[in-house]
Amino acid sequence: MKKSNRNQIKLRKSTKKGTPPGTPIYIGQDREQNSTMTLYTYNPKEYKINKAIGLHDLKGIDKSNWHWLNVIGINNSEFISKICNQLGIHVLTSEDILNTQTRSKSEISNEYIFSVLKLFKNEDPLLIVEEEQVSLVLFENLVISFQEVESDIFEPIRHRIANENSRLRSKGVDYLFCLFHDIIVDNVIEIVDLIEEQNDNLETEITSSVSTHQLLATQSLKKDIVYIKKHVMPMKEAVGKLIRTPSPLIRTETIRFFDDILDHLDYVADSLDSQTLQTVGNRELYMSMMEISMSNVMKVLTVVTSIFIPLTFIVGVYGMNFENMPELKTQYGYYYVMCGMLLLALLMVFYFKKKKWF
Amino acid sequence: MKKSNRNQIKLRKSTKKGTPPGTPIYIGQDREQNSTMTLYTYNPKEYKINKAIGLHDLKGIDKSNWHWLNVIGINNSEFISKICNQLGIHVLTSEDILNTQTRSKSEISNEYIFSVLKLFKNEDPLLIVEEEQVSLVLFENLVISFQEVESDIFEPIRHRIANENSRLRSKGVDYLFCLFHDIIVDNVIEIVDLIEEQNDNLETEITSSVSTHQLLATQSLKKDIVYIKKHVMPMKEAVGKLIRTPSPLIRTETIRFFDDILDHLDYVADSLDSQTLQTVGNRELYMSMMEISMSNVMKVLTVVTSIFIPLTFIVGVYGMNFENMPELKTQYGYYYVMCGMLLLALLMVFYFKKKKWF
Amino acid sequence: MKKSNRNQIKLRKSTKKGTPPGTPIYIGQDREQNSTMTLYTYNPKEYKINKAIGLHDLKGIDKSNWHWLNVIGINNSEFISKICNQLGIHVLTSEDILNTQTRSKSEISNEYIFSVLKLFKNEDPLLIVEEEQVSLVLFENLVISFQEVESDIFEPIRHRIANENSRLRSKGVDYLFCLFHDIIVDNVIEIVDLIEEQNDNLETEITSSVSTHQLLATQSLKKDIVYIKKHVMPMKEAVGKLIRTPSPLIRTETIRFFDDILDHLDYVADSLDSQTLQTVGNRELYMSMMEISMSNVMKVLTVVTSIFIPLTFIVGVYGMNFENMPELKTQYGYYYVMCGMLLLALLMVFYFKKKKWF
Amino acid sequence: MKKSNRNQIKLRKSTKKGTPPGTPIYIGQDREQNSTMTLYTYNPKEYKINKAIGLHDLKGIDKSNWHWLNVIGINNSEFISKICNQLGIHVLTSEDILNTQTRSKSEISNEYIFSVLKLFKNEDPLLIVEEEQVSLVLFENLVISFQEVESDIFEPIRHRIANENSRLRSKGVDYLFCLFHDIIVDNVIEIVDLIEEQNDNLETEITSSVSTHQLLATQSLKKDIVYIKKHVMPMKEAVGKLIRTPSPLIRTETIRFFDDILDHLDYVADSLDSQTLQTVGNRELYMSMMEISMSNVMKVLTVVTSIFIPLTFIVGVYGMNFENMPELKTQYGYYYVMCGMLLLALLMVFYFKKKKWF
Amino acid sequence: MKKSNRNQIKLRKSTKKGTPPGTPIYIGQDREQNSTMTLYTYNPKEYKINKAIGLHDLKGIDKSNWHWLNVIGINNSEFISKICNQLGIHVLTSEDILNTQTRSKSEISNEYIFSVLKLFKNEDPLLIVEEEQVSLVLFENLVISFQEVESDIFEPIRHRIANENSRLRSKGVDYLFCLFHDIIVDNVIEIVDLIEEQNDNLETEITSSVSTHQLLATQSLKKDIVYIKKHVMPMKEAVGKLIRTPSPLIRTETIRFFDDILDHLDYVADSLDSQTLQTVGNRELYMSMMEISMSNVMKVLTVVTSIFIPLTFIVGVYGMNFENMPELKTQYGYYYVMCGMLLLALLMVFYFKKKKWF
């Protein structure tokens, strides 16, 4: 049985009960990790990376270039809180950034656009779906991304920023903001395709021979699908909201790319729906194959019993100790009885064969 | 099996059939309890508690400060009725306050805003969900809360009122009104997280070894989820109504906090949905494990029977009393037969091993 | 098994096929009953009852007082038809009044408001849900109620009309019209609470010991719930329509009471939903307990067979009649064999105990 | 098992693949039948029938009277096509008339209103639902009905046309158009009531004794319900469209009659929903009764085996041929053993009785 | 078990993760195929085919005639990309054309209308549903169709273009564009009718005799239905969008033909819904028939065991070796016992016959 990822997730739940709304407290997995900030500055002509910048560097962000501020590690509540404060992010927004259980959503205010998305990771050869929260804030010339841990998921973006000929370099930060959504959604598609593959393999396996681990694998896949579905639906709402709500921060030509992302999320939702039906089908198939196998066991039992119990009775008859049993004294009685029993057994076998019981 | 909380709830049902609408009659659990009123008066600078105030004290509430009137114990219909009358609360509202079966809702009139919410409590080490009704009325400078029994759920609010630096002290009663909603919803989140944990434990337990109490626990968890879901949906409607309906009693900046609460309720609704699927999954898993175990019992029966019934027949044959049975007189007949039977038994064992029946 | 109420209902179905729409024909249970009319006349100061009035009395209804015309018995199509004609009720409305299968609804025209509602009755100690149709017509100063049979369901209204201090006496006929709805809905609540109680009892019973009658009771409760649900949904629509559609016949202050009734219907709908899930749960529980009990039967069979079949084989061996079986002649052979079998049996018992098969 | 009506329907499917839209080709059951046209001409005072009129007669239809043109037999594509052409019916409409698989709908154009409806027939004592398509076209003074075969379903309309005092004679063709809808819907109600009756009978039957044919009957009823439901939903849409879309061809007073028809269709939809649940319930009941009966079989097997296998072992012991078995030589050994076995058997019986296994 | 078409589809999934949106990369089955372009030019009077034209020919398309450009083979990303570029097709559109996993949709811009549809093919005598993507672009005088492989599905269109009297020749390219949709939808209808037929056959087969392959066939049909449904719903949305969104590229008279196509898609959706229920029904039927057959096996086992085990016990009794067993010495003891056993057996047979166990 594959290890469940729900254990990790359980750890993350520490309740905030008793704190007022807008209290920025980290809610998530315990991590021993320092938060780091990297600033990528670019325009169609130039490009620069500032690694490990500090809080005081945030003031000096010039408005004439485009910037991507990548914040990794959000377990340090105070630090994240200060960043948000510095950049003019509302306290309820910073609370959402710090709470890794925040439902995916997008919020559009006059100052900035805020998106919370879920990044799914499959860290094992045995599909173990795990989820990480990515928060994105889009200002006029700045995109800030908050990640729970270091990962190479946004590597393509780094490459494209570095590449002078990429479309990204000629487009503004709203396109960069869109790219993050695109990568996260492409990631979900990959996971969903993996689930589809596993489901198909399971079906083939169950059809050929039933084994308990298939049941547990089906159960586990179903949980994964429910888990992803739970997060994909809010992501659809979030992207839909970005498309529908006009904001000066996102140009009309970028909207078209968000439309494309929404199409992909529709594809994911469709796939998850049919994969849900597929796991249900696999479970039913498993149970049916179990029943068929049990029915075969029953048939063997019945055939063996039905053949030998009458025969045992017959030999029992001639094992009785009555003094007056004439058959016992005949010369060929034994042989007659043996032949008779053979005949009876053959008849039974023939009868059960006809009934297709074995 | 865990004790069902539905017993208590049954007691509360005394029908109102035959009374006209707007008749303020207490409908709920029988309680021997006096109603008490506590008045908390505060402004950004000062703060005062008046414990155990009487009906006549209600007239003297000054409009220049903010107030929280906490009423505990609603089983005394007449007393509650008088309070409502004194404060100008409509007779249909006071009927709702007194009826602990009122569906969660919010009503917005010109004079006041009325909210009915359900507070879930988990009073045992063994998750036993119980529910209490909390009614809230927001006037211009006054929030009134009606609770069924004394509890420490609103303790954080008392602390914050006492704390001069808390945000609450600088904000009006609409923020206080919002805080009540926030605490009640945080409470639901805690319960739902507990259910998730229990469900996960149950799954692990069922997978390792099947026992009837797991079935009953699953059934019981399912009822709890249905029960909470039934109350959470109206709470979503209620909070949504507060957000959508403009009222001078709630300032725009407070609406944002209600938005936050609605997000949390969405999270709860999502979790309840996936937990429903999880209990269904657990039940199916239980039934499948039962079937698998039953199938194993059947296999043991079939193997034992299939091996020994033919052997018993053979020994029966040589137990027959025919006079003319030459084999009986041979010197090594007995040993031949014994060896033959051993061989047959081994063949059977080999056959069933190959079929993976044990 | 409880008697099904569906038998009665079947009788009521006589098809109208072939008659044009608007043909007033009684469709319902066969009854030998005369229609009677009672007229209650009241105003804040006075109150009068006219029992058993005739068709000609209808003309003399004065417009300065408020009236309630209670018509009991609608099996006389012609009579009802004449009343409707006299009072200016449209032919399609009178067709609906006479057809006890009319779906609950409210129709608002310029002249009058027409409501069809379903009254549920529980006439036995063993919950047998039965349904009666109540039609209500509200004119400017007159409410007409049509009932299938005499019943004490509207007794509270009679009391309140007689009581000079009741709110009813000071309010107009629209409030009276509302009261009918209120009583009918309170009635449904009572039935639904009874169903909840029965469902809870069933669950406890099934958990302690399985019996076929529980299955049938569950099935029967499910049908009752489906049956009530089918009628409650249209009633919600009907009351909702009365609230939403402005009409001079219903004053704004009365709308608030209809809001209250709609809240109660929401409560009923919620309860029916969770009771549906409860019956499903009970059925599943029943089937699981059945399976568990069957599994126990299987285990007993397997244990008994697995212990005694090998032993029987062994005694069979020593019952063979070979001349050369040295063991038979040893002095303690018999005792050795008996001890060996005892040992084997104990081993088996120990093995099955470890497997928790008994 | 009742004969399935799906066989006939299969025949009707001949694909139109490859033909352009608007090609009038008959799609339906093969029939050897000539199309006939009958023209009913009426006004409040006069009434006339022209049987077996030809294509050329269609030109002479005067606009001062009201007409009903009844076309029976649509298997002759060319003929129907010519009629449509003659009367100014669009080619896509005539395609729909000729295709008996057209989904029920209504189309409102400036020239005419077109309705396709499904007529359900129950031609056997054993409910066999079969469906026929009826197309209706309403012009200013003319209603045309297209039927697949001759039937007496519209007989009541013929009577009412002939009857000078009927409401039909005083109303226009829009009322006649409405009457067709009314009759077809009344027809569905009758079928649905029959299904309800059969479902109730099945339930009673299953409860008393289980038999395979009940399973097949349940399955068959479920298919019928699915089949009718599939056609009723589009009919609701069609009638709803007629009500909502204003057209000079239907007068406001006639709309009220369509409202009535829509109410009936709502009743049908409600009934089909609860009948679906009923068939599901019947199936579950059947499976449960099966399981109960199987469990009883198992109990008999276990009881018989558990009583006699140990006894057989005991008699086997005393059938062993050891020379030194002192019990065999005692005078009353045989009787003691017999009594002992009787006692054991009684104990077993008592034990199983207590367990309620028989 | 029929070969699953899901294997092929799996191959097509190569993730695009890491590429920016709007990157035209072929995603689909590996094919070794050159893309070919055929240009059909026509007007009401003339008609011309240009086979195997090249990229440079695209410039010379005159605006005075109507054109159909048929592109077969889209696995050459670069080539398709160049065509799109040449004709002014947006980069996101060309990405969709190249990605065979694009969800069916229609996009309406000022320059062109873009439709992606799924063509279902049934390539085997044993229904194996496979799907191909067809992309259509409608310009003012030009329709471009992109197909994955050469097929004869659009043969009827070629015939109609060649036929001077066909309606197509007198109508513009919007009608041609509509025809593609019509053919693809007619194709789905054919597949769905085939599924219906197979489902009906399966039901008949299961009813007569149960076999494992039926279970697998049912499972497989269910997957096909889910698969088609997943694609039909977006196609409905796409056609609906074409109808609702006004565009100068589609004339009003053509909209009517799209309405017709939408009706057909509604028919398909209805059929798929009832076929889903049918497969569920078939599966349930299969499981029930399995259970019935297993129950029969159990009955045989129980009957045989219950008859012979007691008899074997009796003969065992008289096989005991007690010295003092007076019955053994009586003259007719043997015969009495034999008769007694016969009687007992007959009683048992009679008892089980009455219980209808065989």
Image (tube, coloured by chain):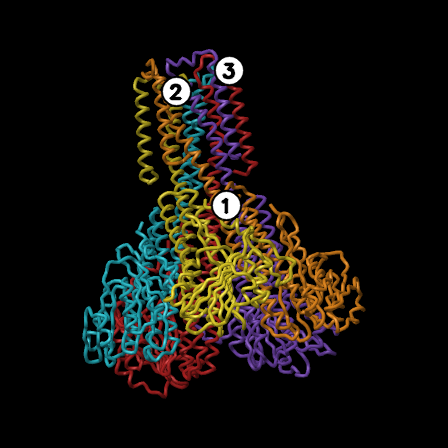
Chain colours: A cyan, B yellow, C orange, D purple, E red
Q: Is residue D29 visible?
A: no
Q: Is residue A322 above or below residue A12?
A: above
Q: Is residue C309 visible?
A: yes
Write down the residue under mark 1: C286
Amino acid at dot 3: Glu
Q: Position of residue A205 (x, y in %)?
A: 33, 51
> What residue does disc 2 label?
C319
Circle 3 is placed at which residue position? E327
Q: CA distance from mark 2 to mark 1?
A: 49 Å
Q: Position of residue A117 (x, y in %)?
A: 33, 66
Q: Earlier in the sequence, mark 2 or mark 1?
A: 1
Quadrant housing residue C21:
bottom right
Kindly check if marks 3 and 2 are in contact, taking CB atoms under 8 A apart as contact: no
Give neighbour class at mark 1: few <14, some 14-19, many 20+ (Cα, 10 Å).
Answer: many
**Res D310 → quadrant:** top left
Q: Chain of mark 2?
A: C
The chain ID associated with circle 3 is E
Q: Is disc 3 in the same subunit as disc 2?
A: no
Give above or below for B112 relative to B272. below
Residue D198, horizontal then vertical, whole percent: 60, 53
Q: What label does residue A58 carry, if any?
A: none
Dot 2 crowding, Cα within 10 Å, few <14, some 14–19, many 20+ = many
